[in-house]
Amino acid sequence: MRVKQVLKDLLGELSSQVRDISLDFIRNGYNESEIKNSFKYLLGLGIKRKRIAGNAALLSFKTQILQDRYDYLRRLQIAPKNISIHAHLLGRDQQTMQHNYDNLRRLQITPKSISTYAQLLGLNPETIQHMQS
């Protein structure tokens, strides 16, 4: 089955919201069963179909990678609701998020504020470094 058809089966009408760059990313490591497993996993985290469609590249990750990244975000005290709202964070590697977290702390942003504004962890590390200047 082709990627577009799998996404249509999973996302229904929302599949039209999947950007071409996400399709290319998914096609690179295309495996229908892994895409379906990742979709089910993301739904299980409370991530809505519309948000999955907007972050469709996450479907190319194996569930173990998604689980590891989710667990890491939870260790940073990011609430499950904030993870589901900022699902794109599951696409960031732990090293980048840790680097961003450390930089935010150097800016004296509290862990509570980081938890509240979790999207800051997804910024380009250079952006955060420029904030320090």
Image (cartoon, grey):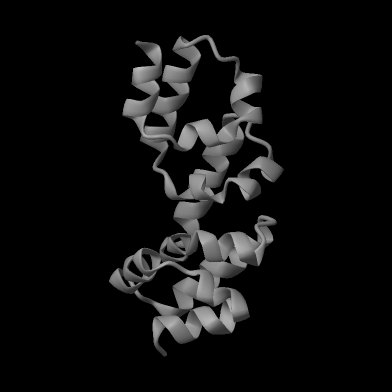
User: Nearest the camera: 47 or 54?
Assistant: 54
Q: Position of residue 54 (x, y in %)?
A: 53, 61
**Residue at image coords 52%, 38%:** 72
Q: Position of residue 12 (x, y in %)?
A: 61, 81
* Picture quadrant of residue 42: bottom right
Residue farthest along the left direction in this orientation: 28
Picture layout, residue 1 above or below residue 60: below
Residue 65 horizontal side relative to residue 9, left or right: left
Residue 116 horizontal side relative to residue 54, left or right: right
Q: Position of residue 67 (x, y in %)?
A: 53, 51
**Residue at image coords 70%, 44%:** 81
Picture layout, residue 35 above or below residue 70: below
User: Nearest the camera: 100 or 98?
Assistant: 100
**Residue at image coords 36%, 34%:** 124
User: Nearest the camera: 36 or 125?
Assistant: 125
Q: Position of residue 83 (x, y in %)?
A: 62, 44
Q: Quadrant of the C terminus?
A: top left
**Residue at image coords 42%, 26%:** 100
Residue 27 horizontal side relative to residue 5, left or right: left
Q: Quadrant of the N terminus?
A: bottom left
* Picture quadrant of residue 13: bottom right
